[in-house]
Amino acid sequence: MPQKIIYADNAATTAVSRSVLEAMLPFFTEDFGNASAMYKTGRNAARAVLKARESAAAALGGNAEPREIFFTSGGTESDNWAVKGAAMLGAAVRTAFVQKRHIVTTAVEHHAVLKSCAALEKQGFSVTYLPPDEFGRVTAEQVAAAITPQTCLVSVMTANNEVGTIMPVAEIGAVCRERGVLFHTDAVQAVGQIPVDVNKMNIDLLSLSGHKLHAPKGIGALYVRKGIELPPFMDGGAQERGRRAGTENVPAIVGLGQALTDAVTDLSERAERLSALRDELICGLLAIPETRLNGHPTERLPGNVNISVRGIEGESLLLMLDMKGICASSGSACASGSGEPSHVLLACGLPRELAQSSLRLTIGGDTSAEDITAIITAVTESVEKLRSLSPYWQRLSH
Ligand SMILES: *Cc1c(COP(=O)(O)O)cnc(C)c1O
């Protein structure tokens, strides 16, 4: 019998769902026309893109408008566009007294935001990286204190991809609105997990990504509040109203629209079920001696579990779990393989040793109660085995 696989790495990527796949299929071979074309298959494609734009707007709160949605190649592109575009808008403000070349962000952002900020620093922008508390959270007060007359952008993620901590985005949005500063949030992990409303939360720019919510990889969107003249990200044709040129990836856009509709349907029921499984998993894992929970105990994504296991290399644990058919991650997928401990865990104040001994399990709609039990057993056994083999652990515990 083939080994049963338990997939617990939904924060890295998700499977394309059946409803998404079915929505996409006709646009590969039947309505494959260019959405700019005049004939019927092109018009059908254009209509499908419009419908997806409406679904995306609806998923971001009742009053978001389809014309505020711009399809991109994913979360990374959306983050790059938002941060660098807002910086260009800031740099264009040039009065005798004010140079808007300052950005406020956090030390726990995804690298798509952090490296965009680093690139801007090389061009003369200054960036404040707010330090989070031990749970990975920054406060609206910290944001307020960091804003200066030079600030052109505040970028704070809605929820963290590694530790699952949810930021007080509505409060931060209110501060930004009051101070007249653009507010971007990377909501890639949040959309479909917790309620997101761009108007209630005063969000000006919002990044989302398809493959984190059961649409394919390589598709995403940037919400741009109307009235913000964000410079184009791609120059070329008139697609996406001239701001993101390139022939539309119609099947992927249709898939994203379907995924977003699915993601906000019964959101609270799904989140409740997932949170209960998550808490059971956390409870079972913390029963292993010398483990700690990373991230916030309550302000936490429904599907995220992140623990550190003293005396264990995260990577070794992953290999053992893989042999038992469990897909998990250590730190972020991007950081794994680099050998560097997670910048998020370090920013939360973990010593390098504990940051390197982290395990992230992100469960999803397919996860069952039996899976949770199986994961707890597998991690417990693997940790015991690894510790029994570790001279370092023997020294620690004696
Ligand atoms: C995955 C992820 C991204 C990048 O999205 P891609 O679509 O993979 O480029 C950005 N931010 C966060 C928080 C993510 O989890």
Image (cartoon, rainbow, N blue to C red):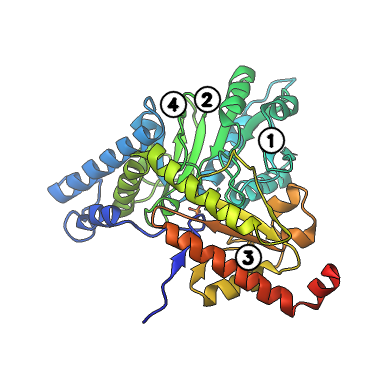
370 lies above or below 298: below
Residue underneath mark 3: 336
Do the residues bearing badges 1 and 4 touch, measured as CB atoms within 8 Å?
no
Q: Is mark 1 within 8 Å of ligand 1?
A: no
Q: Secondary structure at mark 1?
A: loop
Say whether disc 4 or disc 3 marks the residue closer to the N-terminus.
4
Task: Pick whichever, 239 or 335, lies toward us.
Answer: 335
Q: Amino acid at mark 3?
A: Ser
Residue underneath mark 4: 226
**Residue furthest top as drawn:** 178
Q: Nearer the viewer, mark 1 or mark 4?
A: 1
Task: Pick whichever, 189 or 300, lies toward us.
Answer: 300
214 lies above or below 96: below
Q: Is residue 83 left or right of residue 265?
A: right
Say whether disc 4 or disc 2 marks the residue closer to the N-terminus.
2
Q: Say which residue appears at 37% left-offset and 36% top-offset.
A: 59
Residue 214 showing in the rendered view:
yes
Q: Dot 1, crowdedness within 10 Å: few (<14), some or many (≥20)?
A: many
